[in-house]
Amino acid sequence: MDRIDGIPHYVRIREEIRENLLSEKLKKGDRLPSEEELAAFYGVSRMTLRQGINDLIDEGLLYRRHGVGTFVSKNHLMRDHSRLNGFNQQPEPSSDEITEELLSASIVQAKAHVAKALGIEEGDESIRIITLRCIDGEPITIHDIYLPRVLFKNVKLGDIDAAMSNLWEFYSTHGNVIKNGIQRLEARQAEGEIAEQLKLESGAPILYKERTLYAEDGTPIEFLYCYNRGDMYSVTIRLQR
Amino acid sequence: MDRIDGIPHYVRIREEIRENLLSEKLKKGDRLPSEEELAAFYGVSRMTLRQGINDLIDEGLLYRRHGVGTFVSKNHLMRDHSRLNGFNQQPEPSSDEITEELLSASIVQAKAHVAKALGIEEGDESIRIITLRCIDGEPITIHDIYLPRVLFKNVKLGDIDAAMSNLWEFYSTHGNVIKNGIQRLEARQAEGEIAEQLKLESGAPILYKERTLYAEDGTPIEFLYCYNRGDMYSVTIRLQR
DNA sequence: TGAATATAGATATCTAGACAACCTCATTTT
DNA sequence: AAAATGAGGTTGTCTAGATATCTATATTCA
């Protein structure tokens, strides 16, 4: 077998099987043909086939039973906030207009908490970006973002407005590719400026989030405080044993 | 090479490398020896070595750079709520006394929302378990759990009190092994009975959680409403690209 | 000097097998 | 009837290679 493009066989096979799942040629609960049969069908070795299948198992679309077979999972898990996709956040079915407004961009000295998260010294320079996201004109989310200045040396504050639409790509173009992160969620009450900006009564519920994003090697790239209107926002997480 | 126990080589190697990470023989940022060298060292083929390494990469402990090498991540991601561990929830350093009290166990007819989550018909029988978790006597969390009756046919309500300490094991013994799940988080306000039981003022922030747990094949095993005191509880999630 | 090019070494992909471990189910034995 | 056995099929683990692709560095060329 020769590869036509630069696409590895296991990727091609994985995507072909995924198509069969989406088009329901493979239905929930179905058993796939044996690995030997499938490998022969796709014209690859069994190890290569398994590499493709493994990806789909990691995604929860398939599962294996030793000595029995490979099956289609009964719960196709939908949108999954535990994977990073740089806020493509699929617009909900009732897709209203989502806007994002830059409230401020500045250079600040990192306070202790931020510095610790970004792995820099307290007082070191960081870029602070505050944004407001609205759905259909309703304010939903405030982001308070901090970047280590040292990773974005020749960035001017004026550049940020243009980069707003896709911050992650902006990071990439400066050599900082996001690979993973950690976030922590709490329930809080709206107060002061935050309440005002989200047009909430003081005391209204807020889904508060802290998030740190890292590059492949674990270098912190972004630290974020995030305030979400409790009545308009929820987070879905896939759990995996 | 012969395996001494039934332990596969790739598991043994994975754990040996993990030991070296924990003991910091391998430090953050270090490059591991090349795959060829490591395979020779451990006396296995390169494919087998890679299988072990892959697990550690999935855990975020290592990362690879094509053409360059395999490295130790700089951020050893700690406790990770996006993996399921059946509520061993490592007691925090300041480990206070955690107690769990059964408030009620009953057979109820599933309402629409619960029925949909459990994949049963509205009105079908389900087992409802309500518990209160306290830390140091302070009420923290209320769980409102629903199980499909059909999966726990010969269970008597009296059995549940004994099983409380480890519900997941209880599920297993009835042939229902938890493999994955989905949870959704919201910020809400405490009200009525919930506020009372958590000893909160009406209006206090609550971290509200809905969770469905599934078996390997996607069969829903448990559906849960969960109310956490906002000021005493947070959820940490690892994000993976 | 600066750009193109070789080169060495690393990971990525892939093969064509082998045997082990496990599950199911039919058959035989007790 | 119940338990043990065995056969056949499936996934799990593993090998000893091969070639491709990528990266960084050193070298050569303009």
Image (cartoon, coloured by chain):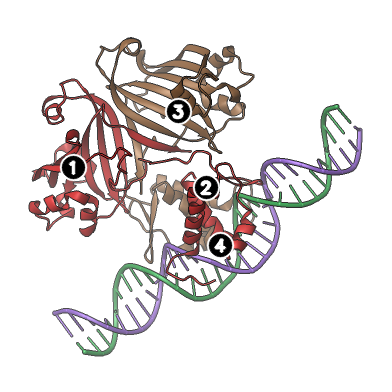
Chain colours: A brown, B red, C green, D purple
Inter-mark Cα distance, 2 to 4: 39 Å
Q: Which residue is mark 2?
A: B24
Q: Which chain letter matches label 3?
A: A
Observer-side mark, 3 or 4, equals 3
Q: Nearer the viewer, residue B191 or A132?
A: B191
> On screen, B187 above or below B223?
above
Answer with the quarter of the image where residue A199 lies: top left
Badge 1 and badge 2 both on one subunit? yes
In the rendered image, residue B230, in percent from the top left (x then y), is placed at 25, 27
Q: CA distance from mark 1 to mark 4?
A: 53 Å
Q: Which residue type carries mark 1?
A: Thr
Q: Label 4 belongs to which residue? A: A45
Q: Is residue A132 left or right of residue B155?
A: right
Position in image of residue C22 (x %, y %): 36, 68
Front of the two marks 1 and 2: 2
Residue B202 rendering spot, x and y as whole percentages: 15, 21
For numbered disc 2, what is the local secondary structure?
loop
Residue located 36% across and 27% down the image: A92
Mark 1–mark 2 CB contact (< 8 Å)? no
Using the image, determine if residue D24 lies above or below residue B193.
Answer: below
Identify the amino acid type marked 2.
Glu
